[in-house]
Image (cartoon, helix red, strand yellow):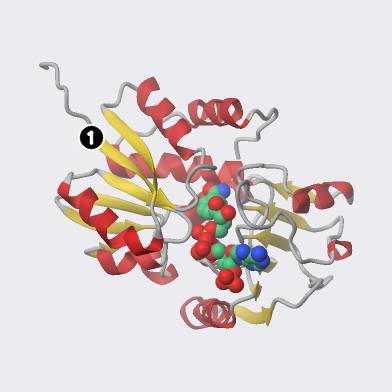
Amino acid sequence: MSETFLCELTGSFSTPAAGNPTVAMMEMAYRHHKLNFRYINCEVAPADLANAVKGARALNWAGFNLSIPHKVAVIKYLDSLGESAEIMGAVNCVVNRDGKFVGENTDGKGFLQAFKKVDTPKGKRIAILGAGGAARAIAVELALDGASDFTIINRDLKRGNELAKLLKQRLHVAAEFNPWCSNYKIKKTTDVIINATSVGMVGGNSSQLDLDTNCVLSNMIVADVIVNPPQTNLLRSACNVGARTIDGLGMMVNQAVIAVQYWTSFEVDPNVMVTELRRVLKVGNIKQS
Ligand code: NDP
């Protein structure tokens, strides 16, 4: 094949974008497997999202990820949605299929793979902190895989109620919404606590969840979606009482492998991504879940 000086473009739209290490592991995977693709991490404000998507169309991007705060807002700029993205009402991965931008969701699937390394979701009572894109994706995949009871805790009443309603009406599981009150106390009967808010993220507004950590018990599984830093205050509290923990890195790597498969039709080696994440985040002992 003759040399080409034109590569396929992929990337991410979010704000704040600077703390998101996805670009490092994507670019490393492309280089490692000699895929003629690039991944560009873009700072995109909410008011600029429509033009960012238009730009990606004009440049014929192969696809792109969406992170905070665009996963729900992007839907109105797309041509169609994949099945799980349609149920969740959130898109984290856009795929250019023959010139049409199709919204998919790989977040929940990535989380589920990480969770299943620790336990089965079947019959579990789940408390989810947050009701944004990540929370919706995780809740839907856990419900599809047999989790039976959900408590959604969120500051914004509309978003929280909507997620509980979605779980009840579309997935037929028990679900209630609790508004987030100060020093929130999670029920002792909870099996799994998941932080699906942005609290704890480097560069974010807050590092500490407004939660009574005495409610975290040793028989619980505690998961956090935060990638940077992987060891959040919540996970530290859980480790201190002997609870099993799941950090955000396994979810991130798993969903990235699925995204690259959508864009390139190639299955990359997840270990290449894990090693690069470990290097850029300067952390040891990352579990590849
Ligand atoms: P969204 O903007 O869609 O939702 C953000 C959520 O965080 C909302 O529920 C919001 O509550 C809540 N929140 C924000 N600040 C606070 C606060 N100070 N106290 C309580 N709740 C708060 O974002 P996403 O769902 O897309 O992302 C959430 C987090 O998940 C991010 O940190 C993101 O990086 C991470 N993530 C990690 C992934 C991984 O692979 N590990 C994949 C996807 C996301 P409210 O509705 O009340 O405003």
Query: Where does residue 166 sit, x and y in percent of width and height?
Result: 50, 78
Q: Which residue bears the numbered disc 1? A: 8
Q: Amino acid at mark 1?
A: Glu
Side of 223 relative to 85 (left or right): right
Which residue: 41% across, 67% down? 72
Closest to the observer, 186 or 117? 186
Quadrant of ligand 1: it is bottom right
Vertical arrangement, residue 32 with respect to residue 183, above or below: above
Side of 28 relative to 164 (left or right): left
The image quadrant that residue 60 belongs to is top left
Query: Where does residue 73 sit, x and y in percent of width and height?
Result: 38, 67
Side of 241 relative to 250 (left or right): right
Q: Is residue 123 visible?
A: no
Query: Where does residue 201 sit, x and y in percent of width and height?
Result: 63, 50
Closest to the observer, 65 or 82? 65
Q: Quadrant of the C terminus?
A: top right
Which residue: 72% across, 43% down? 231
Closest to the observer, 82 or 74? 74
Q: Is residue 98 visible?
A: yes
Mark 1 Cα-neighbour bin, 10 Å: few <14, some 14–19, many ≥20: some
Vertical arrangement, residue 187 with respect to residue 208, above or below: below
Query: Where does residue 174 sit, x and y in percent of width and height?
Result: 62, 80
